[in-house]
Image: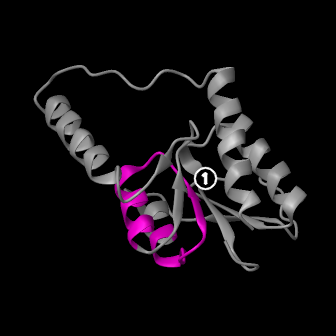
């Protein structure tokens, strides 16, 4: 990540606890965190954080981020297709549990996502991911710190 690098947050599904971790980290290393969502999240507007509210609609926030993100920047998102677009653009990606998504693992994640979509559309109840645990939050904070240390 270069001097003007930014952190992009797919904020519609980002828990408040993680938003707070991101805000503290952005302030600590003086890097801009841009939260994008289709509803107001009460993100403070400062020299290191901003909020972009997009219109409601399927993938509107994802499309906005995909158009704006640049190589070397960081995306925080659980959205696999968005992560794939960001990786293709040269961005770094971690999900909300602190797992790094890369060229090496994104295709298998896309395949699994598509398989689960097919299962759900055929009526199979797949359930969602478990809620974030304290360990998940710690893993996320550690992963974010590792990326920011590359500055």
Residue drawn at point x = 87 percent, y = 66 percent: 46
- Asked if residue 72 is among those painted magenta in the image, a careful observer would answer yes
Give the quarter of the figure containing the N terminus.
Answer: bottom right
Residue at 45% across, 62% down: 62
Q: Is residue 87 left or right of residue 51?
A: left
Q: Residue at x 38, y 66 (%)?
A: 85
Closest to the observer: 83 or 100? 100
The answer to whether one can see residue 41 in this image is no
x%, y% of residue 18?
A: 70, 40
Q: Please rate how many residues cluster around mark 1, counting C-alpha atoms within 10 Å: few if below 14, some from 14 to 19, many from 20.
A: few
Q: Is residue 66 visible?
A: yes
Residue found at the far left of this picture: 122
Dot 1 lies on which element? loop
Q: Quadrant of the C terminus?
A: bottom right
Magenta segment: 65-88
Q: How many discs mark residues in the rendered view? A: 1
- Pick whichever, 89 or 43, lies toward us: 89
Q: Position of residue 31 (x, y in %)?
A: 79, 67
Percent x, y of residue 38 = 55, 56
Tell me: residue 69, above or below residue 12.
Answer: below
Which residue carries the number 1 mark?
Answer: 39
Q: What is the x, y in percent for residue 7?
A: 66, 63
User: What coloring was used for the rendering?
Assistant: one colour
Q: Is residue 150 left or right of residue 78?
A: right
């Amino acid at each position: 990540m270069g001097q003007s690098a930014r952190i992009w947050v797919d904020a519609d599904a980002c828990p408040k606890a993680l938003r707070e971790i991101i805000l503290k980290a952005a302030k600590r290393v003086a890097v801009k965190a841009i939260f994008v969502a289709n509803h107001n999240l009460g993100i403070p507007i400062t020299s290191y954080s901003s909020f972009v509210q997009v219109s409601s609609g399927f993938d509107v926030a994802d499309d906005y981020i995909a158009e704006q993100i640049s190589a070397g920047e960081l995306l925080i998102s659980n959205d696999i297709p968005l992560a794939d677009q960001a990786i293709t653009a040269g961005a770094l990606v971690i999900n909300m549990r602190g797992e790094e998504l890369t060229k090496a693992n994104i295709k298998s994640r896309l395949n699994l996502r598509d398989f689960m979509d097919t299962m759900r559309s055929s009526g199979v109840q797949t359930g969602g991911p478990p809620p974030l645990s304290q360990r998940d939050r710690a893993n996320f904070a550690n992963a974010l710190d590792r990326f920011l240390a590359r500055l």
